[in-house]
Amino acid sequence: MNNLIVMPMALPVLMGIILLFLRPYVKVQRSLSLLVFVANIGISVYLLHLIQQNGVIRLDFGGWEPPFGILFVADSFSMLLVLASSIVAAACLIYSFSSVEPSFEKNFYYSFVLLLIAGVNGSFLTGDIFNLFVCFEIMLLSSYVLITFGGKKGQLRESIKYVIVNVVSSWIFLVAIAYLYGTVGTLNMAHIADRIAESGQTPTLTVISVVFLTVFALKAGLFLYFWLPGSYSVPVTPVAAMFGALLTKVGIYAMFRVFTLMFYHEQQITHTIIGILAGLTLIGGSIGAVAYKDLRMVAAYNVVIAVGFILVGLAVATPAAIEGSIYYLIHDIIIKALLFLLAGTMIAVTGQTKMDEISGLIKNHPLLGWLFFLTTLSLAGIPPLSGFIGKVLIGEGAVGSGSYVLLALAFISSIFVLYSLMRIFLTSFWGETIISKDEEIPAKKGWIVSTCILALGTIALGLGAEPMSVYIQDAAETLLNPQIYIDAVFGDN
Amino acid sequence: MKINNVILRTVAKLVFFIILTLAVYLFFAGHNSPGGGFSGGLVLASALVLLFIVFDIETIQKGIPIDFKLVAAFGAFLSVGTGFGALVFGENFLTQAFDYFNLPFFGEIELTTVTIFEAGVALVVVGVVVTILLSISEDE
């Protein structure tokens, strides 16, 4: 028992509610919400350290022992993701201070950001599959509100699609849970894993696993990403950054959890499907990334490519590939937030959204230009930045298992990522400066601070690969040996 | 348009209290049998909605000058607060406690923390239902 495990979800919920009473006091709202995210960073670092010493920890809510009660389980994989999401949330919050309109702040903007992060963290931590559904819903309900903040025509059009797609996929999720409960008679994830291992993964269970795959593919944008670029390019910048960095990652996390803990017995069926979908996602995302001139669309298609790339690791499922996926997942949370913030800043300072309408930005905004260049290199996987290790490890895993097609697709997609972003860098930052300095809206301090935090994050993650590897190896080991997780849930507390 | 229906108004004033009684009954029945904070809250909200329909919105808002958004917020705070309350006593998050007390007039009675949680749920339901209905009715 360690009540700290629930804090990454409970603190934002509590603070989100408290902020409802503090509606007119914008400054208090800002500092309190930042305080929560900083506290969460501290808590997750401490828990990560604790897990290395004591193994996987759990918390039974209300003292109800598993499999009867609901519980939170913290292993290294969950805590690493909670840590990354807290850092990104803090950075996006700092960006929000100087970018969102005062009317948003008085209309519960910070409450919804806090609840969004509560849902994300809850999804990472929960050990109960129905609770996973609930946490997904908390996250989605807040995202429905956040996507429409501003109420522009495009936002309303895209949000209707977004809401419909997510309501339908949540319904499929519920149906899948009902099927699973009807088959194995339990909702506790460790208990499900235990029962499936005992009875063997029957054809019925494999079908159910494919239903789960459909749901998570919709949420993560694995092949079923048709809704993603539109929805992620309309919200205000900090919200788009949080969506791009976190929401698809929750779907990816769920896929990893479900297909390494429960449904790992029929890999030639399930993991082959994941592999095919990942390959198709890489192709589609790459075409999209080079097809658009709108900065936000390019950024959104880069999210799609990353989803495919990370799931190549799951499809291959060798220890090296899983490690690489975890590494790349954390890298991608940080770098996608940075990419969206930079694209949003470029649009904010120039007032243009298409890359060929912006030119010579580097003259007036040198720091912005070099940060963008750094992001490009990191996304392409140039050492010593954070994208490198993940790509190498996933590549190593793909070679090890002989999946050369996926390997080729994964690395060709990296070239497309590089091309799509270098194109922005060359057309928008280089060239003749069209807008004079006094006509441009100056970049605010908060924008620079938050992007610099994330840029330091990607450098630190790249240079600190060695100390990080302890945690990542532990995370991969728990994913590859479900028994560790099951023992932690049913062992003494 | 203002409706002035004497019979409806007189009956509504009476029925309002009957509905409130049912709401309270449902709320406490929920501890061990069907009912509880959610259904109790819904019935309570329906009583308020009846008032809003029979009289006009301005009159009721003058009579009950409460921001129902804050009612919902307070309810949510109460429910989450009971979860955090367990931490103060060093128990697992969301642990609930109960005990029997001898109160004057009531005699021996079971007091539980889960009732506070349920009261929070009821307030959220009332606040949200009334807020939704008022927001819809504001649009022309």
Image: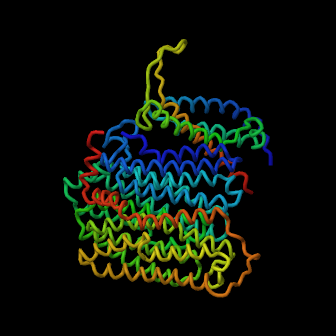
Q: In the rendered image of this protein, does residue A249 appear above or below residue A430?
A: above
Q: Which residue is drawn at the image coordinates 29% and 56% (left, top)? A: A478
Quadrant assignment for the C terminus of chain A = top left
Q: Is residue A464 left or right of residue A242?
A: left
Q: Is residue B26 left or right of residue A471?
A: right
Q: Is A88 drawn above or below residue A27 in the view shown?
A: below
Q: Which image quadrant: the N terminus of chain A? A: top left
- A431 or A96, which is in the foreground? A431
Residue furthest out toward the bottom: A432
Residue B60 lies, in percent from the top left, at 74, 39
Q: Is residue B73 left or right of residue A308?
A: right
Q: Please say if A366 is above or below A57.
A: below
Q: Residue shown at 33%/56% (left/top)? A: A179
Vertical arrangement, residue A244 with respect to residue A187, above or below? below
Q: Nearer the viewer, residue B131 or A242?
A: A242
Residue A217: % across, % down? 40, 67
